[in-house]
Structures are given as structure tokens and as C-alpha cells.
Amino acid sequence: MFKYDTYIESLTDLPEGEEIKLSVRDLTPGKQRYAYKHVMAIVSADPERYPDKMQVRFGRGQLHGQPYSMQVIKEVNIVPERYL
Amino acid sequence: MYKDNREYIKALEAAGELVTINQEVDWDMEAGAIVRKVCEESGPSPLMNKIKDYPGHRYFGAPLASYRKLAIALGLPPDSAIPEIAKVYLERTNKTPIKPVLIDKDKAPVKENIFIGDKADMLDLLPAPIVHEGDGGRYLCTWHFIVTKDPDNGDVNWGMYRQMVYDGKTLTGPLLPFSDGGKVFHGKYKQMGKPMPFATVIGPDPISAIAASAPAPMPETDFAGMLMGKPIELVKCETVDLEVPANAEIVIEGEILPDVSLEEGPFGEYTGYRTSPRDMRQVYRVKAITHRNNPITTISNMGIPTDEGQLLRSFSLGLEMDKLLRSQGIPITGVFMMPESTHHLVIVGVKPIYTNIAAQIAQTVFGSKLGPWFHMVVVVDDECDIYNFNEVLHAWTTKCHPINGIHVWQGVGTPLYPFLSAAERIKSVGPKVCFDCTFPLDWDPLSEVPSLVSFKTVYPKEIQEKVLANWKNYGFKSS
Ligand SMILES: Cc1cc2nc3c(=O)[nH]c(=O)nc-3n(C[C@H](O)[C@H](O)[C@H](O)COP(=O)(O)O)c2cc1C
Ligand SMILES: [Mn+2]
């Protein structure tokens, strides 16, 4: 089961093992499915390397066949406080 | 005509244009797939009474994706021909605008349930569907409109601009800069650095939806009133200084942030493709949600023809062009935009009284507010029936001179055009073409102009009448 997915322009957006800022959708089944969040995370093209499995899509929705794994380091809020 | 979708749904049922689905349907793709198939088959609209994870909620799909449904929505016989529907639309929208009326909150069904602040969580309260596999998110708003107000003159705008659920409190979507709502947001609120109040109306009555998707040259409240023949009933919002239709199913209130953008898309679009990729687009923060009991979320599923966007936008764009061209004294016989062209192709009939009238027609419509949405103008003469594509195609392929009869220009276009390069899309570039399918006026009618060979044009009246009178006697079935 995939825990997250992300949309990218090219695979270079997902450098192996580096801490990156990523916009992901939560795929947990139920009402909250597909909610977005921004996270700092480490990702890998090895689906077993980090705790959560991640699906990758390109800009027009095309699924990338290769499953990824990722670890969320922290969530980041990108909507300024004054609007929350 | 119908004050809400519930009355309209009954009318569709009576005309055999409704299928009621009582088994559970999944909001995650299943409902979308049903609606897509209905569009591709021009089928009856599905009313889905049981939605996974959201008891008490319902879906109404493909609400207006055929001329039959459009005729019903306008209160006409379901079998009305396209020119008849067009005639009624023109008659009604050429009258005096009818201002809306404000009614009390306790008489407004859309206030049956009110959620404000933290309680107004879209993912919790509303069954936003995944319309197509691969879409960037749950598109709650595909047959809806966004109410905004011009801060300078108070003019109200209703525009159908898609919105995706980003999280429980946030929607994102493209508010294109040449749309009416976009002009006020990009041109005014953003410049002032102030959030723009909005109210999204989901499941409006069919007439209000038609008005919101039309390029109305006035506030759509008044345009809808004209189409309805009486004022639209509005009610005040809870948290923003705006009014919404009292009989709508669901209303989301909030503000559009002037200085923040977030991910939106991709989405299956009206051109039949996903053209605009995932990008950073406008951000709508939610302050309140109100809805009727057992609310009905509308779903339009854009893709290959024919969905309501293609059908209604073709219809209203074409008829606004009709008004515009007549207002300029151009002797047109009519305008027909083909939904199958995803409102890219418009056919204009004209009495060619002077040379190059086709180029003038094309430049007038391309240069108007309507211009960014289409790029092919086919001008035929008054002998050709603009609603008969066989006749149009015949005129096109026989009268249009490949060098002298085709004019191209560079204009303004939507970033959704599938044939544009990425660079062109960013710059709102819109190449335009006009096909002049009239014979040159300086040709001598006797020695130069080819004459049309058809039953109606080559036989004397007596022979035509004799043949028609004897048609059955000869052994033919139809007349
Ligand atoms: C289903 C549907 C979705 C649409 N989505 C958008 C959109 O996301 N952004 C946009 O600018 N126009 C969109 N349009 C086109 C506008 O609704 C259309 O241009 C309408 O005339 C806008 O009204 P306005 O003239 O008040 O701007 C959409 C139309 C339909 C039918
Ligand atoms: Mn408008």
C-alpha cells in the first residue's frame, strides 16, 4: 500500500537520499484521502529503503512504474500564519 | 423553469433523461467513470443516491451535456431543434436584465446546515470526487460557480472556474487573467495586496449554471434572471459580503489569497486532453460551508465530446458572437459553434455584400471578449445551412481558396489549447485562422461563378413539386 504520492516534472526532482522539500498527497483510505501537505523528506528509488511507500506521477498524471520510498522529517506550512 | 436542481431532476426523469443509482458508488473514480461514459454516449444523467464514506450525500452527473437537456432546462420541448433553442435564448437574453431579489435566511434551503470556522472542513463534510484517474486532486467544483464582487463598482460576477480540494480548508484552481473574475482578482485585489472574498456555489439551478458558464456581458445574476424570466432569489453569505442563490445545494465561503499560490492540476479538460500540467495556481481559503439537507453535489466530467462545458460554452459563445456581429451591422444569417470541436470551431453564415467580409467577421469575434476561447472561424454564404455540417463541409472544401481564402493572425489564447507549445501557453499566445468559404464578389456571375448542383437549385419548381408529390408512388418510404 502506498502511503503518499507526488507529482514531479522529471526524476531529477527526486534525488536519492537527500533532504528535500516535497509536496505530497496522503493516500490513506477514507475521507481525508488525497489531502496535500508539504514536507521535508528523504526519498529513495528503492521501495524498501525508507518506512513509507510513495507513488510517483508526472505533470499530466502519468504514473511512473517505479515505486519509491520516503521518510517524512517534518511537515512544513507554506500558507502564511495570517491566513490560517 | 426550475428553481433548483431537484425540480430539474424530476423534469429529466419525466423526459426519460435520468437514471437513479441506489447501490453504493465510490467517490474515488467510480462516480467519475460513470459520468464520463454518459457523456460519451449522450446518455441520461445519473443521480447517485449512496456515496461511499459520505452517508446522506448524493451526486448528480452530466447535468446538461446534451441539447435535449438544454431544451428541458430552458422549459422547451425536449426534442426542440438547435436553431429553435438558439432563437429562444437570443430572444430572452436580448431583453432588459432582471435584477435578483434578496430573501430571508430562514426561507433559504441552502442554509439548512451551517458550518463555520474549523467545522467547515471540506474533506469531512463534502464528497469531493476524483473525476479522472491521475487528476491532481479531488475536484469538488466542476459544475458550480464562483461569486465575486468588483471592489470599485460593486459589480457581481458568477464564473465557472474549476476548483480542486487541496486540503480540508483550501481549494486551488486557475483563475485565468482574461476571465471576469480573473480580471478583478489579478487586476485589483492582487495589486492592493488584499484577499478577495468568494463564494462557491455547487449544484446551482440549471439556468444559473448556464449563465455562469456563458460569456455574459453583464452581471450573471441579471443574465440568469433574463433567461429565467424572473429574478433569481439570493441570500446573504455568513462570513463574506456576497450573496448566493438561496436554492443551491452547497455553498463554500472564504477568500482568495493575493500573495500565495499552491499546486493544482493536472485535470482532464474540455479539449479532451490534460493540457495544462500541474502548476502553482490560485488559493481559496475556506471560512464557512452551508448546505441543504441530503445535498446533491453536481459532477461534470470533461474529456472527449460531449460534456456540458463543450455544449453550453459552444452554445453561449456562438450566440454572443451572433449579437456582437449584428450590433456591428454585419448581415449574418446566424452563428453556430460546434460542441464536437470543443468550442474551437465556429461557423458564421453571411450575405456576402462586400469583399473580404469574412476577414472582418473573424477579426471582430477574435478581438472581442470571446476571442481567447476559439481559433477557427469558417464563413459561409447565405445559401449554406450553418447547422448542417454536410453542407458546411461541402462549402469549405469547394469554395475556400487555399491561398486567398485562408487568413491567419496571432491573437490571445487560452493556455489550455492542446496544439500550443509550452512557451506559447505561458505567453497567452493564440494563433487564429479564418476560412473564407464564399466565392469572390468580383467574379462574373454568368461566366465565372460555379453554380451549385443540388435538387433544390438545378430543377425547375414544377419538376421538384412533381417528384416530391410522387415520391411515395415511386416506391420510396421517406419524403
Ligand atoms: C466546467 C467548466 C470549467 C471551467 N473552468 C475554468 C477555469 O478553471 N478557469 C477559467 O478561467 N475558466 C474556466 N471555464 C470557462 C468559464 O466558465 C467561462 O469563460 C465563463 O464564461 C466565465 O465567465 P466570465 O465571462 O464571467 O469570466 C470553465 C468552464 C466550464 C464549463
Ligand atoms: Mn462575467
Image (cartoon, coloured by chain):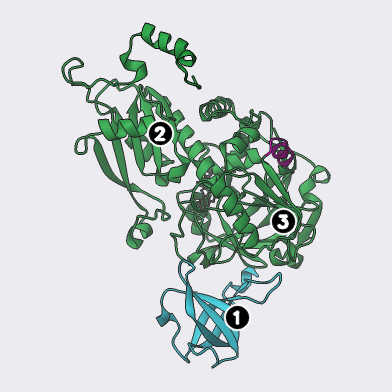
Give how far across and how far down residue B469 sits, in percent: 46, 10
Q: Which residues are magenta?
A: B8-16
Residue under circle 3?
B239
Q: Secondary structure at mark 2?
A: helix
Identity of the amino acid at label 3?
Thr
Q: Vertical placement of B73 versus B308: above or below?
A: above
Q: CA distance from mark 2 to mark 1?
A: 50 Å
Q: Residues within 10 Å of mark 3 (few under 14, many from 20)?
A: some
Residue under circle 2?
B389
Q: Quadrant of residue B162?
A: bottom right
Identity of the amino acid at label 1?
Phe
Chain letter, cyan in picture: A
Q: Secondary structure at mark 3?
A: loop
Labels 2 & 1 near each other (Cβ < 8 A):
no
Is label 1's Cβ within 8 Å of ligand 1?
Answer: no
Q: In the image shown, does B174 or B31 lie closer to the viewer?
A: B31
Residue under circle 1?
A2
Q: Main secondary structure of the magenta part?
A: helix
**Side of A23 where B389 appears, left or right:** left
